[in-house]
């Protein structure tokens, strides 16, 4: 019915980053999709992510077990942005793969549909010992890249809105928005087997230990 939400449960497992809709009907029917939301009980809820009073509204997103906070109201240079993220237990984005690049691009696109000139720092820097190579701020080698135009001579890198959120090399003193990457603060409550007792020694924080014990006359 027009104007009503349509719920389409998926058959797991269905890993992926995008959604496609196919109509199997012999009679042609027009289909208009204004916005699609995809929910899964296997993703990290943003409620498990760290939050801060001064983060912009709607700045938080999660992907593949990690949390991302998009700061677009306090542009900083590269080192200040990195220090800001680290002071809160996070870091600038320090990894790359096609799926993560797709997620970041989508999140930035939907936040800046009317402002394609926006720019965000990432945690990639030119290797001081080999200027033809790049590395992450955690020291790891950068092996998967998404440059819009390789071959620049600046020492830092950004997600470039004017290039479809591909990467551009950038002067490290430029004031830009930035994205902090965090580990979740809690793991969520694990499943509890029937006829058992579960004790969380330090709540359900990351790294906490859980002790299970069987009820009388039962085996785990």
Image (tube, rainbow, N blue to C red):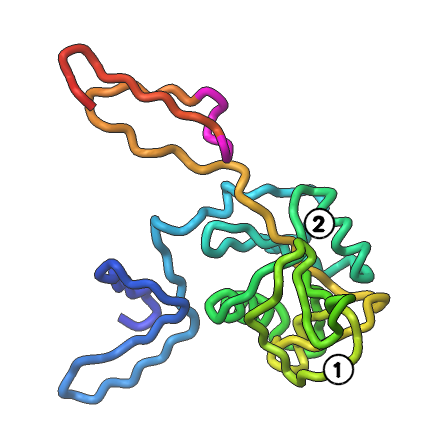
Label 2: state its secondary structure.
helix
* Residue beneath the point at 44% across and 48% down: 44
* Residue beneath the point at 28% across and 17% down: 213
Q: Which residue is mark 2?
A: 85
Few, some or many C-alpha atoms within 10 Å of disc 2 (few <14, some 14-19, many ≥20)? some
Q: Quadrant of residue 20?
A: bottom left
Q: Is residue 200 magenta?
A: no
Q: Which residues are the magenta region? A: 201-207
Residue 136 in sight:
yes
* Residue beneath the point at 50% across and 67% down: 97
Label of residue 212 in the image: none
Look at the picture and state if 201 lies above or below 43: above
C-alpha gap between disc 1 and disc 2: 26 Å
* Residue beneath the point at 24% across and 58% down: 12
Q: Quadrant of residue 7?
A: bottom left
Look at the picture and state if 165 lies above or below 45: below
Label 1: state its secondary structure.
loop
Residue 115 in sight:
no
Q: Which residue is mark 1?
A: 152
Front of the two marks 1 and 2: 1
């Amino acid at each position: 019915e027009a104007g009503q939400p349509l719920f389409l449960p998926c058959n797991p497992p269905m890993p992926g980053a995008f959604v496609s809709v196919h109509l199997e009907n012999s009679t042609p029917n027009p289909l208009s999709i204004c916005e699609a939301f995809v929910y899964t009980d296997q993703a990290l809820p943003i409620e498990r992510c760290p939050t801060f009073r001064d983060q912009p509204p709607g700045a938080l997103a999660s992907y593949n077990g990690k949390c991302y906070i998009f700061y677009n109201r306090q542009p900083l240079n590269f080192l200040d942005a990195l220090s800001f993220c680290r002071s809160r237990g996070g870091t600038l984005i320090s990894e790359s793969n096609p799926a993560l690049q797709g997620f970041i691009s989508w999140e930035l696109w939907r936040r800046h549909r009317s402002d394609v000139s926006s720019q965000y720092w990432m945690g990639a820097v030119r290797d001081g010992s080999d200027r033809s190579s790049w590395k992450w701020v955690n020291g790891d080698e950068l092996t998967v890249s998404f440059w819009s135009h390789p071959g620049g001579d600046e020492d830092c890198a950004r997600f470039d809105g004017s290039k479809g959120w591909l990467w551009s090399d950038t002067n490290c003193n430029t004031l830009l928005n930035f994205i902090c990457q965090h580990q979740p603060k809690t793991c969520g409550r694990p499943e509890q087997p029937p006829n058992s007792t579960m004790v969380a020694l330090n709540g359900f924080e990351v790294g906490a230990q859980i002790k299970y014990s069987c009820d009388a006359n039962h085996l785990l």
